[in-house]
Amino acid sequence: MSTALESIVEGVLEDLQQRIVPLSQLRNSLENAPTVIDAYASLSRPGTQIIAEVKRSSPSKGALAAITDPVALAATYQEADAAVVSVLTEPRRFGGSINDLVAVRRELTIPILRKDFIVTEFQVLETRVIGADLMLLIVASLSDTQLNDFYQMATELGMNVLVEVHDENELERAVAIGAKIIGINSRNLKTLEINPDAFERLIPMVPREILAVAESGIATREQVVIAENAGAQAILVGETLVKSGDPVRAISELLGR
């Protein structure tokens, strides 16, 4: 039986066949890509920073919010002083689209994270072409060679990379490739279960020179404080914001502003 992560990746690869073009053609499109904005610098600002997510649904929770105007929501996040806006581009389980990211990038002036399951060289190039400044690499979905190659390629293209881990072994692999930003995801993507002690256990293991991001399961100020005390410099939040009805207030409450 395949894990949830394996099932998602299978769908990603199937959908990729619908839009694939020669890599040479994609590389030519890089000339027209938007200028990269430094996501690392934005996340390194004083105080705890937030990556605010445009997220319609998830495999674990189903439908979260309709989000008929992703640009308006992203603009609200920017007004609330989010450091980065994350845009889901995976359609099957998360209700995202590349068009969402392109539209958001066109209007915002802060860094954009492409939140997707990057498992091919094509997707790395595509991520830069569509205007993302920060790219997600999920260690659990990649071999050591893929992880290193995709990380180096993204860096050469000018992007920052959020390298996501779920356990000690994955954290070691992320550190080994020279990751500058590591996300500790409390949700195990293989089982979709939340590990409540993931932040306290893993974030202190992230080397001090690496920026640590706490991901998933964050709904209260108390949970943010736990992550902060463990050493997180940023949090990534989606569900809590899109369901709040007032994202500005929700961000303010989470960050204790």
Image: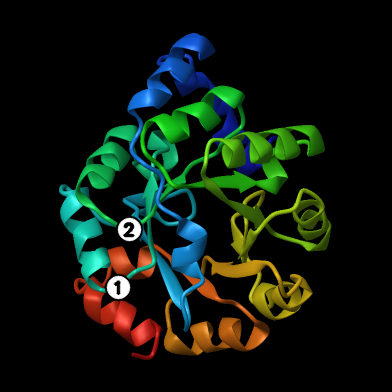
Nearer to me, 66 or 39: 39
Q: Quadrant of the N terminus?
A: top right
Residue 11 is at least partly visible in this image? no
Of the residues shown, which amino acid type is indicated by label 2?
Ile
Return the residue nearer the eye: 83 or 99: 83
Residue at (51%, 20%) from the top-left corner? 14
Residue 138 image point, x, y percent: 63, 47
Q: In the drawing, what numbered circle is on residue 180?
A: none
Residue 4, compared with residue 199, is above or below; it is: above
Residue 242 spot, x, y in % from top left: 29, 63
**Alpha-carbon span between mark 1 and mark 2:** 9 Å
Quarter of image, res 106: top left
The picture places residue 79, in percent across and down from the top left corner, at: 21, 69
Q: Is residue 160 above or below residue 45?
A: above
**Badge 1 is on which residue?**
81
Task: Determine which residue is flagged by label 2.
Answer: 110
| Residue at 63 percent of width and 52 percent of height | 163
Residue 65 percent coordinates (x, y): 26, 56
Q: Would residue 15 be found to the left or right of residue 68 on screen? A: right
Q: Is residue 22 visible?
A: yes
Say what amino acid the circle numbered 1 marks: Asp
Indicate how the structure is coloured in the image: rainbow
Give the side of residue 104 with respect to residue 68, left or right: right
